[in-house]
Image (tube, rainbow, N blue to C red):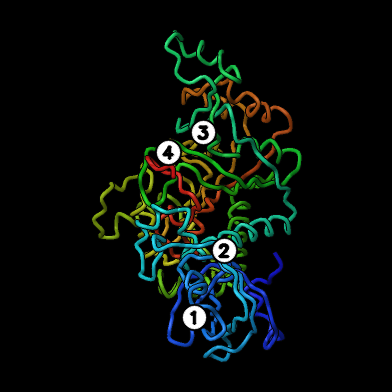
Amino acid sequence: MEHIDLKKIHENAELLGKTVTVCGWVRTSRDSKNVAFAEINDGSELEHVQIVFDKNKFDEQKLAPMLNLGAAIKVVGTVERGMKEESREIRATDVVLLGASDGSYPLQKKRHTMEFLRTIPHLRVRTNTFNAVFRVRSELSYAIHEFFHKNGYYYVHSPIITGSDCEGAGEVFKVTTIGYDPTVKSEDEYYKKDFFGRSAGLTVSGQLEGEVMATALGKIYTFGPTFRAENSNTPRHAAEFWQVEPEVAFADIDDIIGIATDMIKSIVSHLLTHCAPELKFFDERFENGLIAKLRNVAESDFARIDYADAIEVLKKSGKQFVYPVEWGLDLQTEHERYLTDEYFKKPVFVVNYPRKIKSFYMKQNPDGKTVAATDLLVPGVGEIIGCSEREADYDKLLAEIQSRGMKLSDYANYLDLRKFGSVPHSGFGLGLERMLMYVTGMTNIRDVVEFARTKDDLK
């Protein structure tokens, strides 16, 4: 169907006075005695284009369904200046109804709650808010790929179905073809009947496979969906989410912190340039000061603090936290938010976490109590990056797997890497949705995912 994107109407001054063909969905409409108006949007930009219908040239009965909210129309008309110098409208000479919409269309002119919009994921993207969210999500994904491509990384695809739990936390969705079988007498017998002949699940991380690739290609990154069967119903957790996971050979914890910093600054700068209308929209409606916050991220240094020192800062804060603050306990969201929002007022890397609260693969520090691990905490969200140097010593890694009661056969190949040319190497995981929450000011992960997968919700 020959037409031009509505975005070009605003971008190309040469179209003034020219006849064009455009398509879109009716967002708002007004009707008067002699003239009718419809604002349409085709998804190519945040701004709508107003269509002007001279009712002397159109049959009112045929025109009426073209003005219904949600209707899809094709318009031929002349591009004219709008009420503002920079605005544009189209004076219609012909219109075709591509898809009718009746009075039951749920997106009316009133402002709907986010809770209501989550009940209609198939339609909510037609609102200004979600139109903007998913354009930013697209541009954010592109910026991530661009950063790694420009810096010599190879993009690799880790498997979705795996036989191991990378984090060792047991929050894995099982993959099976046989389902419930009351005749099976043991777990081993059950899995022998299954497709792979062993236990399989959806990946919680591409890291272990990423490390394999990095030991041959040097610098790699994975970028894909990951899954966690975590029984959590917080605004920050989803059962299906996308992760960016670089792995870098010949890199220690300080190297990977520098890489993570450069990546965050790069993608934020990209969005400030390429998503200006959307960020302005979010700044005005969801987080006042958002653009200033992002500029500060792009232009200033990130803070860095040792975990032990962070515990002392929290203890001396005078705050009454819900969760206890003690060395050896993980930081909760309220602790992270104090450090970022009140104490540092900018992103901060917390480094050298206690060994017992971190994953088995992290490099042990000389003190034997902590690991070379860091989380990047950002204002308004908390953790968005989990980062560490990986344990390259075979004996230490083997002992850690055994001490945690993990199944050695699931990690045989991973251990094998430490026997053949093992090198210092590091990596991190960035949750795409949490980063998207940070750059848009959206406060619930369900509102930055096209079709959210959360506990008891599979629309």
Which residue type carries mark 3?
A: Phe
Name which residue type carries label 1.
Answer: Phe
Find disc 4 in the rendering and name its residue. 357
Mark 4 → mark 3, Cα distance in angstroms: 9 Å
Mark 1 vs mark 3, foreground winner is 1
Viewer-nearest of discs 2 and 1: 1
Give the label on residue 37, or none.
Answer: 1
- Give the residue type at disc 4: Ile
Reading the image, the residue beneath label 2 is 135
Write down the residue under mark 3.
360
Expressed as whole percent of the image width and height from the top left, the position of residue 295 reads 53, 73
Name the residue rendered at 44%, 18% in the picture: 180
Q: Quadrant of the N terminus?
A: bottom right
Going from N to C along the chain, the mark reached first, 2 or 1, is: 1
**Secondary structure of residue under mark 4:** helix
Foreground mark, 4 or 1, reads 1
Q: Nearer the viewer, residue 218 or 99?
A: 99
Measure how far apart labels 2 and 3 are at the Cα level. 37 Å
Alpha carbon distance from label 2 to label 4: 37 Å
Q: Point out the frontmost of discs 2 and 3.
A: 2
Q: CA distance from mark 1 to mark 3?
A: 62 Å
Of label 1 and label 3, which has the lower sequence position? 1
Q: Residue 134 in the image: x percent, y percent?
A: 54, 60
Labelled pair 2, 1 in contact (Cβ < 8 Å): no
